[in-house]
Image (cartoon, rainbow, N blue to C red):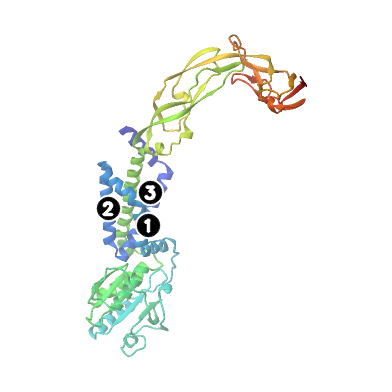
Amino acid sequence: MESFGIAFVIKNLLSWRAIVDVVLMSAVLFFLYRTVIRLGTWKIVRGIMIAVVIFLVASLLDLRGIEWVYSNVSQVAVIALIIIFQPELRKLFERAASIRRIESRDPLIELSSLLAEAMVTLARQKRGAIVVIPGREPINEWLGGGYTLDAKPSLPLITSIFDPHSPGHDGALIVQDGLFRRFGVRLPTSGSEALPEFYGTRHHAAMGLAERSDALVIVVSEERGEISCFRQGSFKLMTEIRPIADIILEHWKESATYAFDMRRRKRKGPLLTQLAVSLLVALVFWVFLITGQGEITEKVLSVPVQFSGLPSGLFLAGEKFDEARVHLAGSAADMNNLSLNQVNVNLDLSSAAAGKQNLVVTEQNLRLPKGIQLLDVTPTSIQVTLVAIVEQEMPVVPQLVGQLPRGLNLDQVIVNPQKVLVRMPAGSGKKQAPELMTTPIYLEGIRHNTKLFGKIIAPPSVQPVDKGWPDVEISVRVQAK
């Protein structure tokens, strides 16, 4: 059994369908991981992972109670998870289906240093500010309001934009293509629990955009004079000009058109690790699933017994077996897909002769799907009796029921046809000759000569030579006493 399961896994793993299956699962896991990282929903994910581990342990130890609970609440749990993770699932599908726009970037050291110096200056003055540097993903759908600027960056301009008396100082400044594109822009707020409770509206707006795109958002707190950099759904505090400028340069290089920069390759380590881990998890999950499907199970079924190839001139007589019980074995996947319509016992009578025959039931007599094996069958043999068939003419006898009305006598009953050519087992008439009778003729309703039509009633062993029994015309003649 164990070698069968290993062979089953290896056989399935080497197919092209398995490779595509594992690759697609790893892609889904990778996108899901990246989305969870950005949205900060690890608490719920950890709870789900703990529940999955408990279920796997219960399955391995065959804990029927836990398995019953999980199987009965699984459908409700799936619906609940879809509702809980609706924002995350939406983000996942958006990222999987989006066509990222490649825009020209000019990662100037002067501009990054200017922005970093401006953030530190505003922090020292405790002026609130929020600066957005888009990545590859378009962000216009997440922005609202604001004023078009399209100005060359400068330190006086950025400090004047975030002057408390400026009409757009509460909004965000968009830095794109080396220009100050817009200011006073409203950003979407975050719905995650990743931020501390004392963080204000600017920080929640920055996290909201960082959760929904790959933009870099820099926030200056007017209460604490802190600088926070939001990216990839996470944030960190900064204090010095050089680290802030490095983060801006790193962001530009990762979203630039020259995707094969040598320094950027050094940053690909974590991404490749995440891809490798996603592929490994998908492979382990696939092997675990296939191993479960490859587990050998047994089942006992009652299946119909059929006879085929009956030679012409022979008749199957005596007791007939309508069904047999078969004991089958196969993988869990094949056994779950097994239907009663797929299994039957077919006994070939093409080489049988007249008399009693003992037919042994073997695996060759069963029509089994691929991968299903026969362990036992009951009965192991079936005895049948074959008799020769003869043709002869038999008279059709009218079946009279009751008596004629008072004052009438039955003169004559004529049946047409009077005889019918039939097939019947040889020797059926030795003890008691079978008869062909008409359907009942009730004499109480006959008061004059009458012509009726009826059917032929024959014993089961007697069959017509033609395709069916002919209709019978019955003439009943009466006379007065």
Badge 1: how crowded within 10 Å, few (<14), some, or many (20+)? few
Left or right of residue 466: residue 116: left
Q: Which residue is mark 2?
A: 51
Q: Which residue is mark 1?
A: 79
Left or right of residue 236: residue 307: right
Instruction: State how far apart marks 2 and 1 are (Cα).
Output: 16 Å
Secondary structure type for disc 2: helix
Measuring from the top left, give residue 301's x and y in whole percent.
41, 31
Secondary structure type for disc 3: helix
Where the N terminus falls, by quadrant? top left
Measuring from the top left, give residue 388's x and y in whole percent.
59, 13
Residue depicted at x 42% and y 48%: 20
Tag nearer the camera, 2 or 1: 1
Q: Which residue is mark 3?
A: 22
Q: Amino acid at mark 3?
A: Val
Instruction: State how far apart marks 3 and 1 are (Cα).
Output: 25 Å
Q: Is residue 415 visible?
A: no
Measuring from the top left, give residue 367's x and y in whole percent.
48, 29
Q: Mark 2 or 3 closer to N-term?
A: 3
Badge 3: how crowded within 10 Å, few (<14), some, or many (20+)? many
Q: Amino acid at mark 2?
A: Ala
